[in-house]
Amino acid sequence: MIEHRNGILIAVALMVGVPAITLVATLHQMFGTGGEGPIRASAVQAPAAAAPAASPSPSSSPSTAAPTQAPRAAAGATPPASAAATPAAPAPVPGRGALDFSASRPAWEGYLRGADPEQGKQLAAAGKPAAGVQACVACHGQAGITPSGGIFPNLAGLTAEYIAKQLADFRQGTRKQPLMNTIAQGLSEQEIGQLAAYYGSLAGPPLHVGEAGGEAARKLDQVGDGTRALPACANCHGLRGLGEGPLLPRLAGQSKEYFADQINAFRNGSRQNDDVGVMRAFAQRLTDSEVEALGQYYAGTR
């Protein structure tokens, strides 16, 4: 009986003693002088400011100059203001700032800051012949509405942000079209911002969306086709193509020729400046007849 009781006591002692010893050792490791402990704010010491080096007197040569001592101030004398000790600026504490985690912004956003639409209007009308930049109105019309349709887009009704991005893409070559690449490369960043601000201030063409194209186009615009993983066009471009957000362009009022030209460019990969390739994927899933119907639907022409 006694042996049984002793065994129980030994077992209880081991159950309590071992965790207690482990806890004490851990606390010593964390807060003792010999281990790695938590870093406390009070433990971060700013480096001491270095004392200024004594400069030799002008009459002494560098090899023989001896340090000089300022005369001791008389007792009770007030030191001049220039001699007052300037408190040292506190040294920055190591760490990260909020800007270290800021998302990068596209360069073209800077082109729009302070952009003058009136300067853009003058540039659109006159161009920059010396730089090989023809007047924008020659292809895009006097008020940003192409009179003859065709493959030239209407710029009126698009946002300044979208136009600035497209011109920046043409300038960098991430969107390819020989004429527009040449024009954009002849423009400065400031001029791109001015043109974008000007055309972004213009009202779009009169709307006749939905008067042509038939039921198939209306369904693709408003509902899409889930069996082909085609979302409704309105999800990104707004109902009836009126635009949705600064970088999702308005389709309403564009010519059916321009619409088909851009869809085909996404299809064959000659245009690749869409966000993560979504337009290239969707364009592949449309049939030729659907592209034609959607072009008529957004243009409002038969």
Image (cartoon, rainbow, N blue to C red):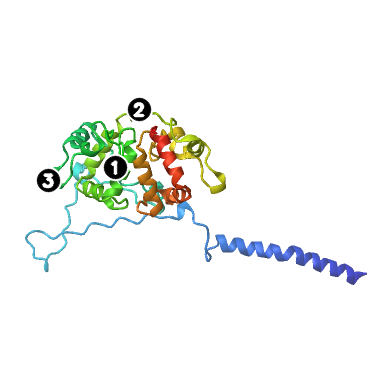
Q: How crowded is mark 1: few (under 14 residues within 10 Å), some or many (20 or more)?
A: some
Q: In which quarter of the image is the N terminus?
A: bottom right
Q: Going 38% across and 34% down the picture, which residue do you hit? A: 299
Q: What element carries label 1?
A: helix
Out of 25 and 151, give the one closest to the viewer: 151
Task: Verify CB contact (< 8 Å) between mark 2 and mark 3.
Answer: no
* Residue 238 coordinates in the image, percent (x, y): 45, 35
For disc 3, the marked residue is 130
Q: What element carries label 2?
A: loop
Q: How crowded is mark 2: few (under 14 residues within 10 Å), some or many (20 or more)?
A: few
Q: Which numbered disc covers residue 110?
A: 1
Badge 2 or badge 3: first in the primary sequence:
3
* Residue 132 coordinates in the image, percent (x, y): 16, 47
- The amino acid on which the numbered mark 2 sits, given as a three-letter code, is Pro
Q: Looking at the image, can residue 165 be seen?
A: yes
Q: Going 28% across and 52% down the picture, which residue do you hit? A: 172
Out of 285 and 117, give the one closest to the viewer: 285
Q: Quadrant of the C terminus?
A: top left
For disc 2, the marked residue is 206
Out of 267 and 101, give the one closest to the viewer: 267
- The amino acid on which the numbered mark 3 sits, given as a three-letter code, is Ala
Q: Residues within 10 Å of mark 3 (few under 14, many from 20)?
A: few
* Residue 138 coordinates in the image, percent (x, y): 21, 38
Distance, label 2 to label 1, CA atoms, is 32 Å
Q: Residue furthest bottom?
A: 3
The image quarter containing residue 142 is: top left
* Residue 32 coordinates in the image, percent (x, y): 55, 62
Q: Which of marks 2 and 1 is in front?
A: 2
Badge 1 or badge 3: first in the primary sequence:
1
Residue 21 relative to residue 98: left or right: right
Q: Nearer the viewer, mark 2 or mark 3?
A: 2
